[in-house]
C-alpha cells in the first residue's frame, strides 16, 4: 500500500512539473534573472550560472531551477547552477517561482555549446592535376564535425587575398555536423603557382571566446597550362652594334634562339615575328 502511495506521489510530481513547464510565464513583471544572461561553453568544459528568482514578491513562494545536467544549490531565492563537465548539447536551465494565481514566472538561460571543427580541407571539385587558363573550376571546402553550424563562417583565400566569405546554409542544429562550401573561380595564367586555402571560424558573439575559434585547411597550389604569346619588335641600331634575334615569347617555355650577327650599317629598323603554340610549365 505504501509502495502504491509512493508511485502516486512520483506521478503527481511529474504531472506538476510538466504542467509548470507548459504554463510558464516568461513575461511576468518580476521575472527571474540569470547571471550571466547568456552562456557560451566549449563541449566538455565546466560552467556555472546564478539565478535570482525574484526581487521581492516571491520570498514566500516556491522557487526552483529545472535543469537536464549539473547540480543546483539554493540560498533563499538565490539559486546556483554548476556543471563540472558539460556534455549536453542543449542544457538551457530554467529558473522559476510560483505566483499567487498558481502559474509560474520563469526565465530560461540560453546556453550555446560549441565544438571547433575537427578538420578543414580544400580541393577542386572533380579535378586533379594541371588546369587550363580561361576555364572555370570549383573550389570545395569541407568542415568536419563542427557545432553549432549556424554560427559557422567559411572564407576562401588566394594567397592572402580574400575571395569569398560564406555563412552556412544548413539547417541549424545543436550537435556537430559536417558542412560543405563551394566557390567557382575563373583561372588565368596569373593563377599559375597560386595557393588556395579556406578558413572555418565560429562566430559566437561577445560572450564567446576571443578571438573566435579558427581552423584552416592546408594550401593547394594551382598549376596552369597556358598559351605562349609573341610580340613584334622594331629595333633602331647604330653601325657596329650587335643585332640579336630578339624573339620575345611569353609562355610556360621560353626560348631566345640565334647567335649575334654583326652588321655594317648606320641605322637599321627591322621587325621579326615569332609563332608559338600551347605549352606548359
Image (cartoon, rainbow, N blue to C red):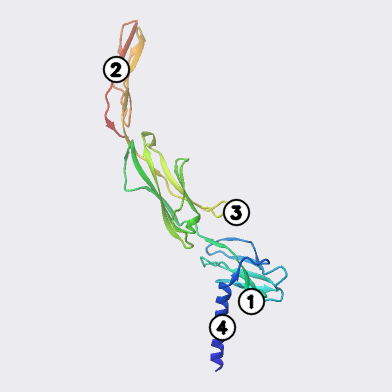
Q: Label 2 belongs to which residue? A: 272
Q: Identify the secondary structure beneath mark 2.
A: strand
Earlier in the chain: of badge 1 and badge 4, it is: 4
The CA distance from mark 1 to mark 2 is: 99 Å
The residue mark sitting in front, 4 or 3, is: 4
- Crowdedness of circle 1 by 10 Å Cα count: few (<14), some, many (20+)? few
> Which numbered disc, 2 or 3, marks the residue closer to the eye?
3
Mark seen at residue 79: none
Query: Which residue is the extreme one toward the front?
Result: 101
Res 49 quadrant in image: bottom right
Of labels 1 and 2, earlier in sequence is 1
Q: Is residue 224 above or below residue 231?
A: below
Asked if labels 2 and 1 touch by Cβ distance under 8 angstroms, the answer is no
Specify which label sits upstream in the sequence, 2 or 4.
Answer: 4
Q: Regarding mark 4 in the picture, which secondary structure is present there?
A: helix
Left or right: 203, with 232 as reference point: right
Q: Earlier in the sequence, mark 2 or mark 3?
A: 3
Q: Where in the figure is residue 271, as x and y percent of width and height?
A: 30, 15
* Dot label at residue 206: 3
Task: Classify 12 as above or below 255.
Answer: below
**Residue to which mark 4 is pinned:** 12
Q: Residue furthest bottom?
A: 1
- Residue placed under numbered mark 1 in the picture: 102
Side of 63 relative to 266 (left or right): right
Mark 2 packing: few (<14 Cα in 10 Å), some, or many (20+)? few
Amino acid at each position: 500500500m505504501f509502495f502504491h502511495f509512493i508511485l502516486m506521489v512520483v506521478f503527481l510530481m511529474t504531472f506538476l512539473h510538466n504542467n509548470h513547464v507548459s504554463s510558464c510565464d516568461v513575461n511576468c513583471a518580476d521575472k527571474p534573472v540569470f547571471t550571466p544572461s547568456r552562456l557560451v561553453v566549449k563541449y566538455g568544459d565546466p560552467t556555472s550560472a546564478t539565478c535570482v528568482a525574484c526581487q521581492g514578491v516571491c520570498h514566500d513562494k516556491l522557487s526552483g531551477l529545472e535543469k537536464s545536467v549539473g547540480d543546483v544549490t539554493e540560498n533563499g531565492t538565490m539559486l546556483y547552477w554548476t556543471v563540472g563537465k558539460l556534455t549536453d548539447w542543449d542544457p538551457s536551465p530554467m529558473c522559476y517561482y510560483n505566483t499567487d494565481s498558481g502559474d509560474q514566472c520563469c526565465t530560461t538561460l540560453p546556453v550555446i555549446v560549441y565544438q571547433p571543427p575537427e578538420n578543414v580541407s580544400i580541393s577542386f571539385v572533380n579535378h586533379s592535376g594541371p588546369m587550363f587558363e580561361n576555364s572555370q573550376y570549383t573550389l570545395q571546402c569541407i568542415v568536419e564535425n563542427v557545432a553549432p553550424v549556424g554560427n559557422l563562417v567559411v572564407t576562401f583565400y588566394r594567397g592572402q587575398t580574400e575571395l569569398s566569405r560564406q555563412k552556412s546554409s544548413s539547417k541549424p542544429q545543436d550537435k556537430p555536423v559536417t558542412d560543405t562550401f563551394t566557390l567557382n573561380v575563373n583561372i588565368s595564367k596569373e593563377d599559375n603557382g597560386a595557393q588556395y586555402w579556406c578558413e572555418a571560424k565560429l562566430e559566437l558573439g561577445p560572450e564567446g571566446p576571443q578571438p573566435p575559434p579558427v581552423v584552416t585547411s592546408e594550401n593547394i597550389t594551382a598549376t596552369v597550362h597556358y598559351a605562349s604569346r609573341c610580340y613584334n619588335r622594331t629595333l633602331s641600331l647604330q653601325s657596329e652594334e650587335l643585332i640579336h634575334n630578339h624573339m620575345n615569347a611569353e609562355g610556360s617555355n621560353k626560348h631566345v634562339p640565334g647567335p649575334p650577327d654583326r652588321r655594317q650599317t648606320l641605322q637599321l629598323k627591322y621587325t621579326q615575328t615569332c609563332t608559338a603554340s600551347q605549352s606548359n610549365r
